[in-house]
Amino acid sequence: MNKKIHFIILFTFSLFLSNFTPGSYSINAKTILDSDTIADIAQKISYSVVNIDTSQELKKSDGKIKSYTFGGIELHIPEIIPQPEAGTGSGVIFREDGYILTNYHVVKAADKITVTLKDERKFEGKLIAQDSYSDLALIKIDAKNLSPAKFGDSKILRPGDWVIAIGSPLGLEHTVTFGIISALSRHVGVTFGAAQGAFKYIQTDAAINPGNSGGPLVNLNGEVIGINTFIIGRNAQNLNFAIPGDYAEQIGEQLITSGTIKHPYLGIKMTNLEDIHLNAEGLPKDIMGAYVVEVVPGSPAQINGIVPGDIIQKLDGIEISEPTKIAEIIRNKKVGGKIHIKLLRNGKTEVIKLKIGDLPDEENKEKLIP
């Protein structure tokens, strides 16, 4: 028996075990995985994956010095000439008429965007809409009858599910890697996007490298369940993260219809409630909540009287045990909606009603916690 047949048998049996639950019995595996399976899925989705090359015109000195005299003062100024700086990334065809979804950081600083399709046709891309907080953007090329990717339901993923990543790591177009979902609902501290942790990333061990950003993470049905976005650590291995596909699809649709995204926003910076905070307030150790470290001037929180040192215990009746819970609740609210906040201040309970604001554009404001 060859290795390929061994692998089919073992994988089929493992799927049988994973699908077995008490009171049920089934021998029908959803997918029989062998080398052809991965190749078939990769080939199918590859027509929906593009390579994105970018260039940014930077001003650099060529070493020549020009001299000028002003009012008897001689000035020696290096001659500056523009030189392009190149970058690369990946993208997913979102609509058949030329809309492509990618990470905003891939195209953010680009003066020129070149999109290469699977059939090696090249098009000039134009950034038409972006959402800096989710780190997603739409670019448009002048092409028709493209092959848009199909998005799957990332909410039903489980750790251990098989996934495929396709992209252009280090400019190597349509590179295919294979792995599993390592974990779900990861709050990860990154320096861009994600509305400051308002949604949770998919962690995978499928190899992701610079240039994979904006490319798809795909399930065994060939559906996009994530947009590969970043890796963690120089020394760590297989710690790769993707924006959940259903969230990315939602952002893409809104960017097409509205051109912009409104993010619900309070304007507070929080941390976990620690013993040092409780001791300072003379509060018992079993108090739960999120500790307010900073309130943004002019934000809904500041306008309605929330101050540093407040301990937020409930939002609309939902108990708060950590700051990320607040971010999750606020993300599911609408801009302009009302919310009730129960908090402790100087050991006394207060309830504040406030109107949820619209998160300021990250391009013009310092990053804020929603």
Image: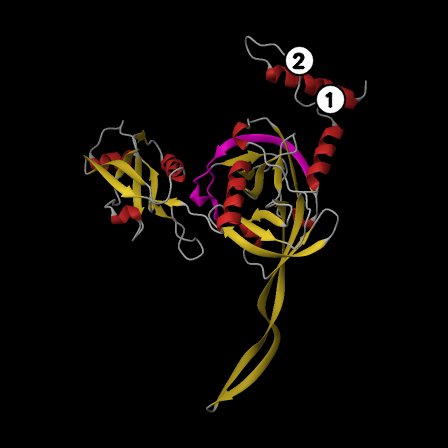
Q: Is residue 283 above or below residue 61?
A: above
Identify which residue is drawn at 68% across, 56% down.
123
Q: Position of residue 365 (x, y in %)?
A: 40, 55
Query: Is 183 covered by the magenta stretch?
Result: yes
Mark 2 neighbour class, 10 Å CA radius: few under 14, some 14 to 19, many 20 or more: few
Q: Which residue is mark 1?
A: 7
Q: Amino acid at mark 1?
A: Phe
What is the span of residues highlighted in magenta in the rendered image?
176-199
Label at residue 35: none
Give the colour scheme of this rendering: secondary structure
Residue 119 visible in this rendered orientation of the protein: yes
Q: Is residue 253 above or below residue 29?
A: below
Find the residue positioned furthest to the bottom.
Answer: 72
The quarter of the displayed image where residue 108 is located: bottom right
Task: Determine whether, in the image, residue 124 is placed left or right of residue 361.
Answer: right
Identify which residue is drawn at 70% across, 49% down.
117
Residue 235 visible in this rendered orientation of the protein: no
Query: Is 310 covered by the magenta stretch?
Result: no
Q: Position of residue 166 (x, y in %)?
A: 66, 40
Q: Position of residue 194 (x, y in %)?
A: 47, 44
Q: Amino acid at mark 2?
A: Ile
The quarter of the displayed image where residue 264 is located: top left
Find the residue positioned furthest to the top.
Answer: 23
Q: Which residue is mark 2?
A: 27
Tell which of 154 and 284 is nearer to you.
154
Q: Secondary structure at mark 1?
A: helix
Q: Earlier in the sequence, mark 2 or mark 1?
A: 1
Please identify the quadrant where the C terminus is shown: top left
Tell which of 353 and 230 is nearer to you.
353
